Amino acid sequence: MTKYRICLLPGDGVGPEVSEATLQVLNALADYLDSKLDIRFIEGGDNYAQRYGQPLPEEAILAIRDSDACLKGPVGATAMDVTVRLRQMFDLYANVRPIKSYSNVQSLSDNVDFVIVRENTEDLYKGFEFELDDTTVALRVITKKSCLRIAEYAFRLARERNNKKSVVAVHKANVMRKTCGTFLAACREVARSHEEINFSDMLVDTAAMNLIRRPDSFDVIVTTNVFGDILSDEAAQIVGGLGMAPSANIGENFALFEPVHGSAPDIAGLGVANPLSMILSAKMMLEWIGSTRNDDKFRKAAAFLQRAVERTLLQGVKTPDIGGTSKTTDVASAVRESLSLGVRSLA
Ligand code: ATP
């Protein structure tokens, strides 16, 4: 029987709490998935670095190399050495961040449902920075190859998602003519081979405004690394905040799933962190396994999990960040229960 090997890196701050909640939820699906998920823990992040002097041990990298996917909690100050390093090491070129409104969670509009597709390996986050006397310089690296690849991913996603079938390329090509110019030209080139998709482009400042003004008008946004990073935190606030924001880092044959938020040290250990960002990241992982390994049960499990999250929120089981009084563990139990009911009804 094929088993899918998953590395689970709990991380720092609220990471262990939301990871435990997510693990419980995945365990509730174990029977339905014929125990095909083989989850092994790996270490890394701030706490690990404090104890052992480095943030990402070689054993963790080897375990990840030997797995199908990684589910990662947030790490704190070592994010550059862990998260960004893994994205670059495994060429996880597409950072996919769905933004969706849920019933019973305050949102700017009831019909928000879009995805930010962010190029994940280039731009200012390459980390090429220099000092020249008292001047500091950062290099913005944008290659045509990466732009074509991310644009292609965004158009394929728009084709599969729903009936809106639209892609907006977000850039600042009127000022950064070379780097954003390359990105925009690549998006236009890819658009020509996807005539069924409505393509348009938007300046990043206009996009920041329109996310607030008319968030329900978007379907797929494709953009470069830094703009995507900033816009996706803004977008998460539209639908209830970082506790509701999952993400995937997708490569050719491997992917890493993680909540968008950081380690949230201000609430770590209080038991009130919203686990839904990580639970929904695990849902994206099930979906990804389902489609890349052509395993229908995983696709269905992802759909069950989505519905279980929706039911949990409708029941009012919510952490304080989204207006509730529940604990992290209450949310995990409610999702688990709802999931078991859903799975049993199929049996
Ligand atoms: P880091 O240094 O790791 O980036 P941070 O506090 O600067 O941490 P985030 O961790 O992203 O950045 O947190 C930003 C705010 O969002 C904090 O007030 C935090 O409590 C809140 N927050 C983040 N994640 C969650 C969560 N899962 N549940 C509830 N609140 C959260």
Image (cartoon, rainbow, N blue to C red):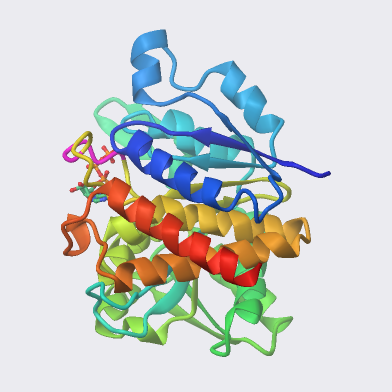
- Say which quarter of the image contains residue 216: bottom left
Q: Residue at x 21, y 46 (%)?
A: 272
- Say which quarter of the image contains residue 11: top left
The reply to whether residue 42 is visible in this rendering is yes
Is residue 331 found left or right of 190 in the rendered image?
left
Q: Nearer the viewer, residue 47 or 88?
A: 47
Q: Is residue 37 above or below residue 286?
A: above
Q: Residue at x 32, y 64 (%)?
A: 236
Is residue 254 found left or right of 79 in the rendered image?
right
- Say which quarter of the image contains residue 345: bottom right
Q: Nearer the viewer, residue 273 or 70?
A: 273
Q: Residue at x 27, y 71 (%)?
A: 238
- Magenta-drawn segment: 263-267
Residue 10 percent location from the top left of the image: 43, 33
Q: Nearer the viewer, residue 21 or 264?
A: 21
Residue 329 percent location from the top left of the image: 31, 46
Residue 152 percent location from the top left of the image: 67, 68
Q: Residue at x 69, y 31 (%)?
A: 65
